[in-house]
Amino acid sequence: MNLYLMQHGACLPQEVNANQPLSPVGQSQVASAAQAMRVMGLWFDALLTSPRAAAVQTTGIVTEGLGYAASSVTNFAGLDPGVSLKVCLEQLRVCERYQSVFLCGELPLLGDLASHLLTSGPRLSLALEGGALLAIGVTSLSSRSGSLRWLLQGPQLQMIAAS
């Protein structure tokens, strides 16, 4: 299975809006990322999002940009803010039958998930800036033998989108 982990785009400061939706910069980041995904020919069997406003908006922009129906998105409890890595992994097991799964959420959970899948040692620190997209190949969520396919930051996604 291929897991595609996306950090939501830049959001408004909590002082401006307590729900922290995407900022105009974040909307632009994600629109570029969605265009890059289209150029790269990515497709997903499942689109899962954290219930956090910025993640829901990010997934909505990606979904629209790739031509999926809005109903294709699942609000995934395993990506809720404050959920432990253990709970996230347990709930992700329902996706093991899929070939390609998109997960949109936030740090630190996305970083913890990537680190768990890619290493058996100390925590791996990954820079997942707003709108970054990470691809990991896994044979099983139970094993810690994932394969890093690639990590694309916002500027790289913008370059791909422009091609």
Image (spheres, helix red, strand yellow):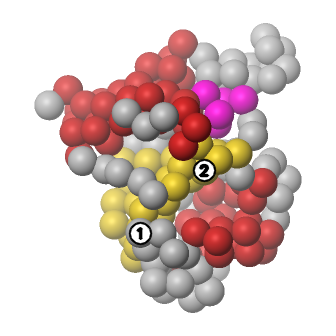
How dense is the environment of label 1, judged by Cα within 10 Å: few (below 14), some, or many (20 and up)?
some
Instruction: Tell me which amino acid carries mark 2.
Output: Leu
Of the numbered discs 1 and 2, the one sitting upstream in the chain is 2
Which residue corresponds to the image point at 65% horizontal and 75% vertical from the top-left?
93
Q: Which type of secondary structure does the marked residue at label 2 adopt?
A: strand
Which residue corresponds to the image point at 43% horizontal and 73% vertical from the top-left?
1
**Quadrant in the picture for residue 96:** bottom right
Q: Quadrant of the C terminus?
A: top left
How dense is the environment of label 2, judged by Cα within 10 Å: few (below 14), some, or many (20 and up)?
many
Residue 4 in sight from this viewpoint: no
| Residue, disc 2 | 48
Contact, mark 1 vs mark 2 (Cβ under 8 Å): no
**Quadrant in the picture for residue 160:** top left
Would residue 156 appear left or right of 73 to someone viewing this image?
Answer: left
Stretch in magenta: 53-57
Residue 16 in sight from this viewpoint: yes
Assess whether residue 54 is covered by the magenta stretch: yes
Location of residue 59 in the rendering, given as x and y in whole percent from the top left corner:
55, 36
State the CA–CA distance, disc 1 to disc 2: 14 Å
Query: Magenta residues: mostly which secondary structure?
Result: helix
Q: How many numbered circles does the render carry?
A: 2
Which residue corresponds to the image point at 72% horizontal and 29% vertical from the top-left?
53
Instruction: Tell me which amino acid carries mark 1.
Output: Gln
Location of residue 50 in the rendering, given as x and y in whole percent from the top left corner:
70, 45
| For residue 74, above or below residue 33 | below
Residue 61 disc label: none
Nearest to the observer: residue 95 or residue 19: 95
Location of residue 150 in the rendering, given as x and y in whole percent from the top left corner:
34, 60
Which residue corresponds to the image point at 51% horizontal and 20% vertical from the top-left?
27
| Residue, disc 1 | 99
